[in-house]
Amino acid sequence: MNKIVIILSLGVCCLDASTTQNVHITHEWGYPNLEESEEFQNWGGDCDNGRQQSPIDINFNKVLKGIYPKLIFNGYNSIAGCNIVNNGHSIQLSSFPQEMEISGGPLLASYIVEQIHFHWWSEHTLNNTRYPFEMHVVHRNKKYGNMTQAMKFKNGITVLGILYHYSNVGNPSIENVGKALNDSGLFNLINDPRKMNRLVSMKELIPQKIDSYITYEGSLTTPLCSEIVQWIIPLTTFPVRMNEILPFRKIENDDGKVITNNFREIQKTRNRPLIEISENIVSSSTKNDGLVSSPLTFFVLVCFVIPCL
């Protein structure tokens, strides 16, 4: 049997999302209480009718091997004095004291962190395995002045989705966010941001070195479910103790109901390319094939098995 490696060069386009977005969204939306066997809601608009929705299950039998430049992180240090808020759907951190910027990888521009929020159980799954916790680090394209402007464009948003697994090893920064909820009594205070004085280290929230990840084009996982997101899902999961997640599961929504879980159900992949980036792949390909990567193109390695003639 001979294996032939075909290299595809794919471009990325920038589209104004407002030209295709259906904005008829259910006025009140939320998450079902799965402990009471409630069903997921239809949220309307692109949430129901979109073709590139998130989250998805990442099936490793269906991913393509790719090569990108390395991801570059600047300013992802310890943060204190940011805002923390219960927005009725999640706990969100924003108004950070320093600018945190990501570039490289599949990104054709630099993106800065706008907010961080959390999901208890994970939204993305790996081979149909759901993790107990997922953090979304939401970035906007630096060329756009704010999130409202960035959300109008296909290249406006990138989200770093970090998965956490249960462990006896604690995560001090997740624990400090939980303690901040107790400090400020945010469990039943909706859209009432408070200053968080407890220290959060980005080095405890995301892997020190992201050399293996999945990237794909998708959407926001909350209404309007705009299909404007370049997702980056590191394949390294982080430890968290069960008791560190418990404070999150005590917050309430607008109706005064406890949000026991806040993940969206898995969406159809619809033949979207899921690209796996691995340092081992990059090193091997660079050494043996002399491939050159640039921010304008990426290489997808597809192996076809063809019988010897």
Image (tube, rainbow, N blue to C red):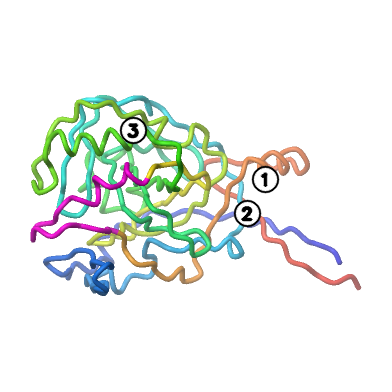
Cα distance in 3D space between marks 1 and 3: 32 Å
Relative image position of residue 25 (x, y in whole percent): 17, 68
Front-most of 156 and 134?
134
Could you classify mark 3 by the number of other residues whose Cα lies within 10 Å: few (under 14), some (14-19), or many (20 or more)?
many
| Residue ID for mark 2 | 65
- Range drawn in magenta: 242-262
Point 33% across, 48% down: residue:
157
Per the rendering, the mark at residue 173 is 3
**Which corner quadrant holds the N terminus?**
bottom right
79 is higher (above) or lower (below) than 308 = above
Per the rendering, the mark at residue 281 is 1
Front-most of 260 and 101?
260
Q: Amino acid at mark 1?
A: Ile
Could one spot residue 25 in this view of the protein? Answer: yes
Point 51% across, 70% down: residue:
271
Mark 1 or mark 3, which has the lower sequence index? 3
Cα distance in 3D space between marks 2 and 3: 33 Å
Cα distance in 3D space between marks 2 and 1: 8 Å
Point 37% across, 50% down: residue:
133
Q: Is residue 295 magenta?
A: no
**Which corner quadrant holds the C terminus?**
bottom right
Point 17% across, 57% down: residue:
258
